Image (spheres, coloured by chain):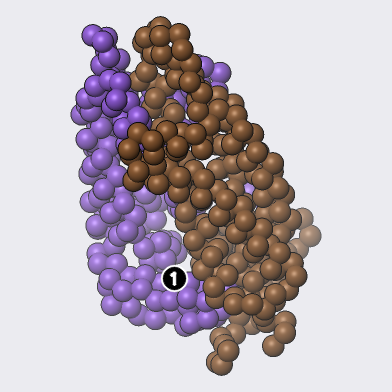
Chain colours: A purple, B brown
């Protein structure tokens, strides 16, 4: 890493949308604080944030594996059958000469969600069970937060829905184990993200170092 | 606006973009970088070159948006007969097939959202560039909406990826992807980067100067 000039820290919150300097409040769990100037979300306190996030992540990990191992959907038309997995679409796009699109679909539906699950487990696990920060927690947790918008499980599901409707006129479709696991994965990952309070995690990571 | 809070920047402070820690502004020594003591991210008072980067990305996306809509995103070939679909004709087919709610959903995600993002970000860039004082709170809200809604445009891309994987039955039915799909995917990704590189604090910096 390049040499860095030391910085001095201050116990305030700066609104990330309008830069207003605000005092940090002690919030009751389940409530949020908004910026007085622009209305942006500046603080949100969750119930048992780290415990709950970890619980949802473990459930998510199991469902993620199931969603990738079992068949996703079976397509039947005039006596012929085509079984596809979660990853099939990305592979076919790659094979058919659209590697950029294949990579995009793979990363947004499998790669980034996987990074998010493993990365969060890596950061939160040691913090919860050993009260110590993981090695290189800074870059790792930053990466997890940065890839948040790029994990698109729920958008993928809507894409599946539209595809099913489009095909239902001409063929029969049977969802497989992976399909239902994927539905569960969306719920658990949404819950994990909703219980995660990044500010709290940063604070604990910074204090435990 | 009464009792407007002081900004971090005016107080000689800056909030880390990555972890939110507030640090005192100072100049990095030559050849060194200023990093957050907690998360090690580079710290700066505003996102670097925000206006230039957002403008460049937005322009790229706007150019790509044209082929994304003109070229077919996929072609369904059934018993030797091909039917090409663009983004808009796909929506129209859904509507004709009686799937009004689904057609509305796809219309929202694939047509309305990209247009909203392109025009909304252009509007925000112009408003900062021309130093407008008009409704900063609402413009920040607009930015928040643009930032959160962008990912939903991926519906069409995902739909295509599922169709090409499922419908591979030789001459009975196959689906081929079109150039429009790649362009559209690029538009979604580039507009997401564009909205990420825009710094909403610039809207408020203009207000500050006039007070």
Q: In front here: A96 or A9?
A: A96
Q: Quick check: can you spot residue B165? A: yes
> What x and y, as percent, mark residue A139?
51, 51
The residue that appears at 27% across and 14% down in the rendered structure is A77
The residue that appears at 49% across and 61% down in the rendered structure is B145
Above or below residue A60? Residue B145 is below
Q: Quick check: can you spot residue A74? A: no
Res A152 → quadrant:
top left
The residue that appears at 28% across and 71% down in the rendered structure is A30
Q: The C terminus of chain A is located in which quarter?
A: bottom left
Residue sitting at the far bottom:
B2
Above or below residue A149? Residue B136 is below
Q: Along the horizontal axis of the image, is A116 left or right of B48?
A: left
Residue at label 1? A41
Q: Along the horizontal axis of the image, is A40 left or right of B28?
A: left
The residue that appears at 57% across and 70% down in the rendered structure is B139
> What x and y, as percent, mark residue A154?
35, 44
> What x and y, as percent, mark residue A9?
56, 73
Q: In front here: A190 or B132?
A: B132
């Amino acid at each position: 890493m390049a040499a860095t000039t030391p910085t001095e820290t201050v116990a305030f919150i700066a609104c990330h949308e309008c830069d207003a300097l605000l005092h940090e409040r002690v919030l009751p769990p389940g409530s949020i604080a908004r910026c007085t100037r622009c209305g942006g979300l500046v603080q949100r306190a969750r119930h048992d944030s780290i415990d709950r996030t970890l619980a949802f992540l473990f459930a998510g990990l199991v469902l993620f594996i199931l969603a990738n191992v079992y068949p996703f959907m079976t397509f039947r038309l005039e006596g012929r059958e085509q079984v596809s997995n979660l990853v099939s679409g990305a592979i076919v796009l790659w094979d058919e000469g659209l590697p950029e699109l294949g990579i995009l679909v793979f990363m947004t539906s499998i790669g980034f969600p996987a990074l998010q699950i493993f990365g969060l487990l890596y950061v939160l696990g040691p913090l919860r069970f050993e009260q110590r920060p993981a090695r290189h927690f800074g870059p790792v947790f930053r990466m997890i937060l940065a890839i948040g918008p790029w994990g698109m499980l729920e958008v993928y599901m809507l894409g599946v829905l539209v595809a099913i409707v489009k095909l239902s006129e001409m063929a029969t479709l049977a969802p497989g184990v992976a399909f239902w696991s994927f539905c569960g994965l969306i719920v658990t990952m949404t819950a994990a993200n909703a219980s995660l309070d990044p500010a709290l995690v940063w604070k604990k990571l910074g204090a435990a170092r | 606006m009464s009792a407007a809070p002081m900004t971090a920047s005016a107080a000689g402070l800056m909030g880390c973009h990555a972890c939110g820690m507030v640090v005192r502004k100072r100049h990095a020594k030559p050849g060194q970088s200023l990093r957050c003591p907690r998360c090690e991210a580079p710290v700066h008072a505003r996102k670097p070159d925000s206006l230039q980067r957002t403008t460049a990305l937005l322009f790229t996306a706007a150019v790509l948006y044209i082929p994304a809509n003109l070229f077919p995103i996929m072609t369904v070939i059934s018993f030797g007969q091909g039917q090409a679909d663009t983004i808009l004709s796909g929506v129209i087919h859904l509507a004709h097939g009686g799937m009004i709610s689904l057609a509305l959903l796809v219309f929202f995600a694939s047509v309305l959202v990209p247009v909203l993002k392109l025009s909304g970000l252009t509007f925000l860039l112009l408003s900062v560039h021309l130093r407008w004082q008009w409704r900063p709170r609402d413009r920040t809200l607009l930015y928040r909406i643009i930032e959160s809604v962008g990912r939903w445009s991926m519906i069409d891309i995902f739909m295509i990826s599922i169709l090409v994987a499922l419908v591979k039955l030789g001459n009975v039915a196959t689906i081929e992807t079109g150039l429009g799909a790649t362009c559209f995917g690029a538009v979604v990704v580039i507009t997401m980067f564009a909205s990420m590189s825009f710094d909403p604090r610039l809207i408020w910096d203009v207000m500050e100067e006039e007070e």
